[in-house]
Image (spheres, rainbow, N blue to C red):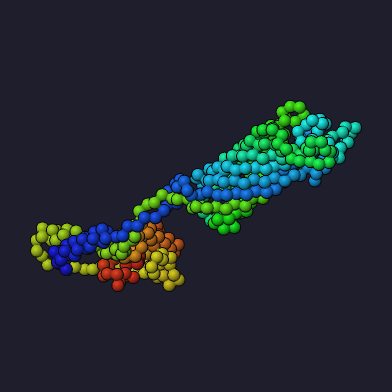
């Protein structure tokens, strides 16, 4: 092929490649590897209902039977997650607390019920129902420690917050002793609390869980303000509305076009041949014309490989053993071992390593058969061995063994 034809073919390939690059389609998609963004305000809301039991833990309550200390508790919240880790909720609570007192005028005292006697001390039962608003800040443990996953079944989060409760107590109606009614005690109770909620997602919208909560209430009791401690265990049912997953940054994605690596490799090989031919032509023109006898030196042996293989078969080892016998017969001769790989398949980095592996395998096998390592020079050639095109690429997957000049 003439040099002008090769250059024209090369220009056509480059132009075609540039056109293909500009014609590639660009799409946009979310990339979670870039992190997660804050969603719109309308997304990631939830409604949560809770129901369970509460128990007071004051010092006198130990004298009351365990089962008699349990009282109902319930909550209803509306909340929102502002990120995969941080959220908040606002709602209303109801909690009923049972206790014991020695003060007849204490909040919620029920003198008409059984008086408990312990160690010569007499205690009256109390019961107070608390109602009021509450607010919590939530932190997702699973998303913080394990990373956000949209399809995770189990999630756990801790929360802390407080509320303002109104106390309701049961008292006898005016002028009666056996007829009772619930009345507002006009005792505003400030409470702080913290807890752990474990949820299991039954679907993208609905989850069930268990909420374990500790409370501290500052209420009026025994002729003064007293801090009462309590614990709650509540079953939770959560319904999520709006978008429940999280947005990732949108990045452009170029749809891959036709794979032109084969043509690029052939073009690079053609460029190398052109440069080599130009150098040979220049050297030829600078020499006087004389008749020369060109002798093509054939390799002492050539070992061929399948695609991506560098290990020797049993047949190959026999060939190498025969070559080793020749080398050992004359230890003064040096030999060049060259590793080859075709440039039509695989990446450049992979083929470079493949050539090294092939030639090192043959060299090590020759040494194993008794050849002196000083006789061997292992090298690689990054070009194609034959340049006969991709139809003959099997001839380029080889290790050649030649007598060094």
Q: Is residue 296 left or right of residue 188?
A: left
Q: Quadrant of residue 274?
A: bottom left
Q: Nearer the viewer, residue 295 or 82?
A: 82
Residue visible at 47% across and 46% down? Answer: 41
Residue at image coords 21%, 61%: 15
**Relative side of 58 to 316, left or right:** right
Classify the position of the C terminus by image quarter.
Answer: bottom left
Q: Nearer the viewer, residue 384 or 131?
A: 131
Q: How many marks?
A: 0
- Say whether residue 363 is left or right of residue 63: left
**Residue most toward the left?**
288
Quadrant assignment, res 272: bottom left
| Residue, far right | 120
Q: How far across and how far down the image is residue 331, in percent? A: 36, 61
Q: Residue at x 57, y 46 (%)?
A: 78
Q: Nearer the viewer, residue 309 or 249?
A: 249
Percent x, y of residue 71: 75, 44
Which quadrant, please, contains the N terminus? Answer: bottom left
Residue 205, visible in the rendered structure: yes
Regarding residue 377, the answer to whether it shows in the image is no
Q: Residue furthest front?
A: 175
Residue in the foreground of this view, choosing between 10 and 354: 10
Residue 49 location in percent, x, y? 62, 49
Q: Residue at x 32, y 67 (%)?
A: 396
Residue 309 spot, x, y in % from top left: 41, 66
């Amino acid at each position: 092929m003439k040099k002008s034809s090769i250059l024209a073919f090369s220009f056509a390939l480059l132009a075609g490649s540039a056109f293909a690059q500009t014609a590639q389609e660009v799409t946009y998609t979310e990339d979670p590897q870039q992190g997660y963004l804050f969603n719109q305000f309308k997304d990631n809301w939830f409604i949560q209902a809770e129901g369970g039991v509460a128990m007071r833990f004051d010092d006198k309550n130990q004298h009351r039977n365990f089962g008699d200390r349990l009282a109902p508790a319930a909550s209803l919240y509306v909340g929102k997650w502002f990120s995969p880790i941080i959220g908040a909720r606002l709602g209303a609570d109801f909690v009923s607390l049972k206790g014991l007192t020695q003060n007849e005028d204490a909040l919620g005292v029920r003198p008409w019920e059984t008086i408990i006697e312990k160690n010569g001390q007499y205690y009256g039962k109390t019961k107070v129902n608390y109602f009021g608003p509450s607010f919590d800040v939530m932190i997702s443990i699973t998303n913080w420690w394990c990373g956000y996953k949209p399809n995770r079944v189990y999630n756990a989060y801790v929360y802390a917050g407080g509320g303002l409760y109104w106390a309701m107590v049961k008292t006898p109606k005016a002028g009666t002793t056996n007829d009772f009614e619930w009345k507002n005690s006009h005792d505003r109770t400030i409470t702080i609390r913290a807890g752990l909620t474990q949820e299991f997602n039954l679907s993208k919208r609905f989850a069930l869980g268990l909420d374990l909560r500790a409370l501290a209430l500052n209420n009026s009791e025994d002729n003064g303000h007293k801090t009462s401690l309590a614990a709650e265990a509540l079953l939770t049912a959560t319904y999520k509305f709006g978008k429940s997953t999280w947005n990732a940054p949108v990045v452009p994605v170029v749809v891959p076009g036709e794979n032109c690596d084969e043509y690029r490799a052939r073009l690079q090989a053609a460029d190398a041949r052109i440069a080599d031919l130009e150098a040979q032509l220049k050297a030829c023109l600078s020499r006087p014309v004389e008749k020369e006898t060109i002798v093509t030196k054939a390799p002492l042996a050539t070992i061929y490989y399948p695609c991506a293989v560098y290990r020797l078969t049993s047949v190959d080892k026999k060939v190498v053993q025969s070559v080793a016998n020749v080398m050992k017969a004359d230890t003064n001769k040096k030999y060049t071992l060259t590793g080859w790989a075709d440039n039509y398949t695989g990446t450049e980095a992979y083929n470079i390593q493949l050539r090294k592996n092939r030639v090192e395998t043959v060299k090590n096998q020759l040494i194993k058969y008794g050849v002196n390592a000083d006789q061997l020079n292992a090298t690689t050639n990054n070009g194609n061995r034959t340049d006969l095109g991709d139809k003959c690429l099997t001839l380029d997957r080889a290790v050649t063994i030649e007598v060094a000049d």
